[in-house]
Image (spheres, grey):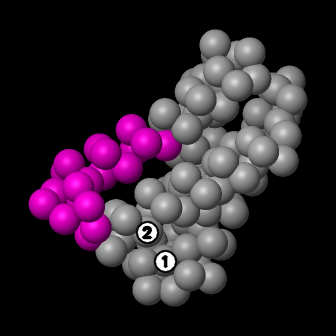
Amino acid sequence: MTFLTLIFAHLLADYPLQGEFLATMKGKNIVLLFSHAGIWTGCIAVAGHLLGLDITVLDVGILFAVHAIADYLKAAGLLWYRKMDALKGGLISDQLIHAAQISLLLAMNGGI
């Protein structure tokens, strides 16, 4: 249930809490990219803490950095995203990265 709760927190942070403005502009402005990555990281970290995980500064740093890099690569159409449709393979790739982040967080905190 912990994994599903964190996935729900992810979906909230990555969709309704991001909004159209951040989604559109995060690839063009680093402050907006970091704002979105911070909102997402905060949601995951707070949810994890409330679920009893021992969330550390290292956890927060990894969550933030990976999310920001993944979203930048997708928004800029770099690396593997270059050949992907943003709403098909790009979206699936992005979501798999974020699900892997949550899985890694749980593994690092004894939740898996």
Decide if residue 48 is in sight here: yes
57 in the magenta segment: no
Give the amino acid type for the residue marked by disc 2 in the picture.
Tyr
Give the residues drawn in magenta, as a range: 77-98
Q: Secondary structure at mark 1?
A: loop
Which class describes the residues within 10 Å of circle 1: few (<14), some (14-19), or many (20+)?
Answer: many
Above or below, comparing residue 5 to residue 66 in the picture: above
Question: In the rendered structure, are the residues bearing label 1 and label 2 in contact, judged by CB atoms less than 8 Å apart?
Answer: yes
Instruction: Give the residue number, with chain letter if any, for mark 2.
Output: 72
Q: Where is residue 6 drawn, in percent x and y?
A: 63, 33
| Frontmost residue, 2 versus 54 | 54
- 54 displayed left or right of 60: right
Q: Residue at x 64, y 48 (%)?
A: 63
- Quadrant where the C terminus sits is top right
92 in the magenta segment: yes
> What's the mark number on residue 26?
1
- Quadrant where the N terminus sits is top right
> What's the mark number on residue 78?
none
The quadrant holding residue 27 is bottom left
Q: Residue at x 43, y 68 (%)?
A: 72
Q: Residue at x 48, y 77 (%)?
A: 26
Q: Where is residue 30 drawn, in percent x and y?
A: 56, 82
Q: Secondary structure at mark 2?
A: helix
Prevalent SS, magenta region: helix
